[in-house]
Image: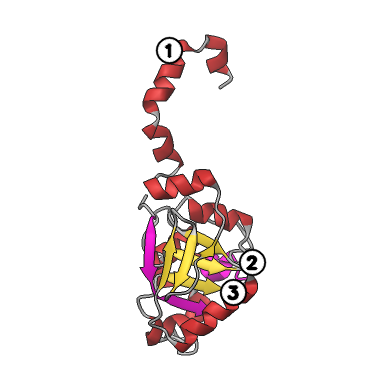
Amino acid sequence: MQPFTRLVATATPLRQENVDTDQVIPARFLTGTVKTGLGSHLFNDWRYRGDGSPDPCFVLNDPRFEGARILIAGRNFGCGSSREHAPWALTDYGFRAIIAPSFADIFCNNALKNSLLPVALPSQTVSDLMGRVEADPRLEIVIDLASQTVTVDDGAALSFEIDPFRKQCLLEGLDDIGYALKRQASIAAYEQTASPSALSYA
């Protein structure tokens, strides 16, 4: 998993609340088990017209926001059904972080396990930030995971919360399997000293 330490990037404002995972990546595209190739279908039904042409009204088709690596959205982002393909599609498109007032729990956990950082900030702060990005699409936002802050220009750093375990995994670029493999020596040492009954119920 790609480590997440400090991100300096522009953002795409998506003025939409309750974005569900079926809009992030429609179910008909969930036919694979690999993490790549889904970016072209991200927000497919909002992004493309019925004839397959890009909808110029959708923000991802606005050339001013091309290359943005941060998505700013409304509250309750990632609601709906659980699907790990949603963070896969977002990261494959190029996003590394999402700023919103709140996230659905399952989406949040799936994102953190796939090197996509969900940053929850107060609603008014997110709205103000969205307005600034709309006024200046080249505005750079700095997200520093170690200090758990978001900074824009020379403004005050905005703090955000994150689970300490998931934070460390992101900083080290470890998913659950990688975390266990990194501690193989400790696991082997425990197995040498633990009683057979303890291992049976471990």
Residue pictured at 44% horizontal, 45% vertical:
169
Q: Which residue is mark 1?
A: 192
Amino acid type at circle 2 is: Asn
Along the horizontal axis of the image, is 163 left or right of 66? right
Amino acid type at circle 3 is: Thr
- Residue 1 vs 154, above or below: the answer is above
On whether residue 15 falls in the magenta region, the answer is: yes
Residue 152 in picture, x, y percent from top left: 45, 74
Q: Secondary structure at mark 2?
A: loop
Camera sees residue 125 = yes
- Badge 1: residue crowd in 10 Å (few <14, some 14–19, many ≥20): few
Q: Which dot marks residue 125?
A: 3
Q: Secondary structure at mark 1?
A: helix
Q: Secondary structure at mark 3?
A: helix
Residue 156 in picture, x, y percent from top left: 50, 70
Q: Nearer the viewer, residue 30 or 1?
A: 1
Q: CA distance from mark 3 to mark 1?
A: 53 Å
Camera sees residue 48 = no
Residue pictured at 52% horizontal, 10% vertical:
196
Q: Which residue is mark 2?
A: 76
* First to last magenta residue range: 5-27
Amino acid type at circle 1 is: Gln
